[in-house]
Image: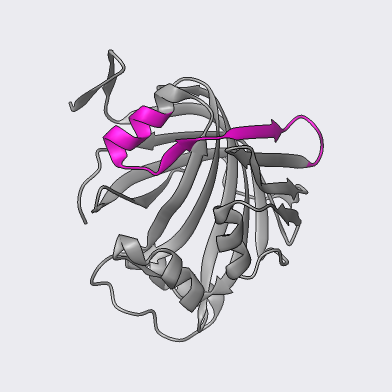
Amino acid sequence: MARHLIQGREVTMPVRVRDVMVCSASYLVRADAARAVIAYSHLDVAEVLPRKALCTLVFADYLDSDLDRYHEFGVAFLARPPGSGHVPGGGLRANLAELRRTGAGAFVHWLPVDQGFTLEAGRAIWGFPKELADIDLRMSSPYKRCIVRKDGRLVLDLLIKPGVPVPGTGMVTALDAYSHRDGVTRRIPWSLTPRGIRARPGGALIRLGNHPIARELSELGLPKRALVTSTISHLAMSFGEAKEP
């Protein structure tokens, strides 16, 4: 069993998250713009429709995990693994199914957190692009809201309106996450077990600030209508050891 020493504490693999509340908004964005954003990773975005990529904004309240309790915000893109080739033309559903078959995963472009232990663990164990930020989560009201500030500058203010209940409670889903740090791209095995899923088309309101990440999102075409939003009231996850793809 692999072990990592983080701030004098031993972290054993896989790292487990026993309970986290997650909200997300996914957007169709220009594939050429998304490709330019993640060019440093040497991965390619997955075109879920011709010339369209998928960008997801996610915020999470980690209530019980091996890396303590913390808040997190993420910017991720659906990306193709090296050597997977292009997805054939077709509808969104067919293309997503083909991408799953070929091992497409979530490339994590930016991942601010508000606690130091998870910051160091995320960087050292998986190469995640974690950095400290002010993350104001408002999860107790019917509408879920996240306000992110970095270095005193507003990055974004994101509001999500929960949708209708959907199936999937208790089902285990295996995915790959991808990270890039210190010139190395890594693949991280990732499993998720959700309970209390709600989803809907649209359902997000976003206001961008003047931070460089906000400018990147603006260049992708945000703010715009979300393709889909989701909320998960209880999510369990595990993360395996990172490997080069």
Expressed as whole percent of the image width and height from the top left, the position of residue 25 reads 64, 55
Residue 48 visible in the displayed image: no
Front in this rendered view, residue 240 or 209: 209
Is 26 on the left or on the right of 11, as rendered?
right
Tell me what residue is drawn at x 68 percent, y 33 percent: 137
Does 128 appear in magenta?
yes
User: Toward which corner of the image does residue 101 lie, by quadrant?
Assistant: bottom left
State the residue at coordinates (40%, 69%).
99
Q: Is residue 43 visible to the viewer in this orientation of the structure?
A: yes
Residue 7 vs residue 200: left or right? left
Coloring basis for residues: one colour
Say above or below: 59 vs 56.
Answer: above
The residue that appears at 82% across and 38% down in the rendered structure is 142
Residue 65 position, x and y percent, is 46, 23
Range of magenta residues:
119-143
- Screen quadrant of the C terminus: bottom left
Q: Is residue 184 left or right of residue 137?
A: left
Q: Quadrant of the N terminus?
A: top left
Residue 13 in the image, given as x and y percentages of width and height: 27, 28
| Residue drawn at x 65%, y 50% as measured from the top left | 230
* Residue sitting nearer the eye, 95 or 132: 132
Residue 244: x and y in percent read 20, 52
Q: Residue furthest bottom?
A: 89
Magenta-colored stretch includes residue 13: no
Quarter of the rendering containing residue 148: top right
In this picture, is 139 found above or below 73? above
